């Protein structure tokens, strides 16, 4: 039994509807771009949703850690610090210092900052410090004058080296006698050497105190003393204001405790804080010179004993000396 073809009359009857259906959804074709075959054209509602996500959706999606680190506000470097500025200065002594910021929970290190081995919870940035060459030359001149006058009269008789030699030699000889490397007849002469070293040390301490007292009186009476102290007070105040402004504007510190309860090192500092914490304050001109041969930026470990240890900040380089 053969199949009969569909009636032509039915096709002709449905022709207007079949032709009208494509034209009803052929807006892309009218614009000159036909959709690919077999792909359904997105509706206006779906196009609007993909092109402009709602504000609620943007608010609910937090930025990634990479986006937070790379944001312009988080990567801005602290402004340079200018000390003892003079109008019209064009010649500068420049160096970079390390400044420190404590990382709070969920904080990420900012772009261009560094880590230190003393604590994983500190972020370190570098800041330029400028001082006019003329002002720095005055620091060098007055600092050298103070050093020479305070060390006047010191020499072999005010040095603890002879006492140290006697005590160390006698102690080493006694160990040799105990191990039978030296004859036992040397026991009492070696004990006498140790006793003599202790006596020499006591005499040296007395002489040294007298010499230092005389040198301090001579420095106090010198005309350079007032000039030195005035410059030291000015520099100390400017350095204190610069640290306060740095902390207020960027959150970085020039002196920061490593952690609560820490012992060694107790604090980290941009430069040696002892001259500016003293009363009266003084200064070290070398604190404002760059590292030799454009080496790494240096910072200071302040230990609980008061000892200062200079460290290099890995991954950095200082200015070259002019």
Image (cartoon, rainbow, N blue to C red):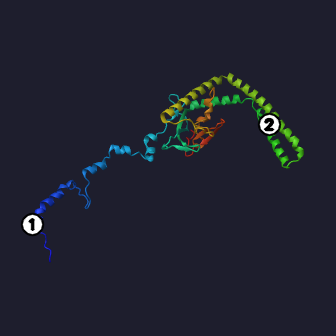
Can you name the residue that lies furthest to the left here? Answer: 9
Kind of element beneath mark 1: helix
Kind of element beneath mark 2: helix
What x and y, as percent, mark residue 159? Answer: 76, 34
Q: Nearer the viewer, residue 212 or 120?
A: 120
What x and y, as percent, mark residue 55? Answer: 33, 43
Which quarter of the figure has residue 71? top left
Mark 1 packing: few (<14 Cα in 10 Å), some, or many (20+)?
few
The residue at the point 15 percent across, 57 percent down is 20
- Residue carrying label 2: 163
Q: Nearer the viewer, residue 216 or 209?
A: 209
Can you name the residue that lies furthest to the front here? Answer: 1
- Asked whether residue 12 appears in the rendered view, the answer is yes
| 216 left or right, relative to 162 | left
The residue at the point 84 percent across, 36 percent down is 196
Image depth: mark 2 or mark 1 in front? 1
Mark positioned earlier in the residue sequence (2 or 1): 1
The residue at the point 77 percent across, 35 percent down is 160
| 195 left or right, relative to 237 | right
Q: Is residue 195 above or below residue 315?
A: above
Mark 2 packing: few (<14 Cα in 10 Å), some, or many (20+)?
many
Q: Nearer the viewer, residue 297 or 178?
A: 178
- Residue carrying label 1: 9
| 203 left or right, relative to 59 | right
- Asked whether residue 284 appears in the rendered view, the answer is no
Circles 2, 1 touching at the beta carbon (< 8 Å): no
What x and y, as percent, mark residue 44? Answer: 25, 50
Give me the disc on residue 69. Answer: none
Q: CA distance from mark 2 to mark 1?
A: 129 Å
* Quadrant where the image shows the N terminus: bottom left
* Quadrant where the image shows the C terminus: top right
What x and y, as percent, mark residue 110? Answer: 48, 43
């Amino acid at each position: 039994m053969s199949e009969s073809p569909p009636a032509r009359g039915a096709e002709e009857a449905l022709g207007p509807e079949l032709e009208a259906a494509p034209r009803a959804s052929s807006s892309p074709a009218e614009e000159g771009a036909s959709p690919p075959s077999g792909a359904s054209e997105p509706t206006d509602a779906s196009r609007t949703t993909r092109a402009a996500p709602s504000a609620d959706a943007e608010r609910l999606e937090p930025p990634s850690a990479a986006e937070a680190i790379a944001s312009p506000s988080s990567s801005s470097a602290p402004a340079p610090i200018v000390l003892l500025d003079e109008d019209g200065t064009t010649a500068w002594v420049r160096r970079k210092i390390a400044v420190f910021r404590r990382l709070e929970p969920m904080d990420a290190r900012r772009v261009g900052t560094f880590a230190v081995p003393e604590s994983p919870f500190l972020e370190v940035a570098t800041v330029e410090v400028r001082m006019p060459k003329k002002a720095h030359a005055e620091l060098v001149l007055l600092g050298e004058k103070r050093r020479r006058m305070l060390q006047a009269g010191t020499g072999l008789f005010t040095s603890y080296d002879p006492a140290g030699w006697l005590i160390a030699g006698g102690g080493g000889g006694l160990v040799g006698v105990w191990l039978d490397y030296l004859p036992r007849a040397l026991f009492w002469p070696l004990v006498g050497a140790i006793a003599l070293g202790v006596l020499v040390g006591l005499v040296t301490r007395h002489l040294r105190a007298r010499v230092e007292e005389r040198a301090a009186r001579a420095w106090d009476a010198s005309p350079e003393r007032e000039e030195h102290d005035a410059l030291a007070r000015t520099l100390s105040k400017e350095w204190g204001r610069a640290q306060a402004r740095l902390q207020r504007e960027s959150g970085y510190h020039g002196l920061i405790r490593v952690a609560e309860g820490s012992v060694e090192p107790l604090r980290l500092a941009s430069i040696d804080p002892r001259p500016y914490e003293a009363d009266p304050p003084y200064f070290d001109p070398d604190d404002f010179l760059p590292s030799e041969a454009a080496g790494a930026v240096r910072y200071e470990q302040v230990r609980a004993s008061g000892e200062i240890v200079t460290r290099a900040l890995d991954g950095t380089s200082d200015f070259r000396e002019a």
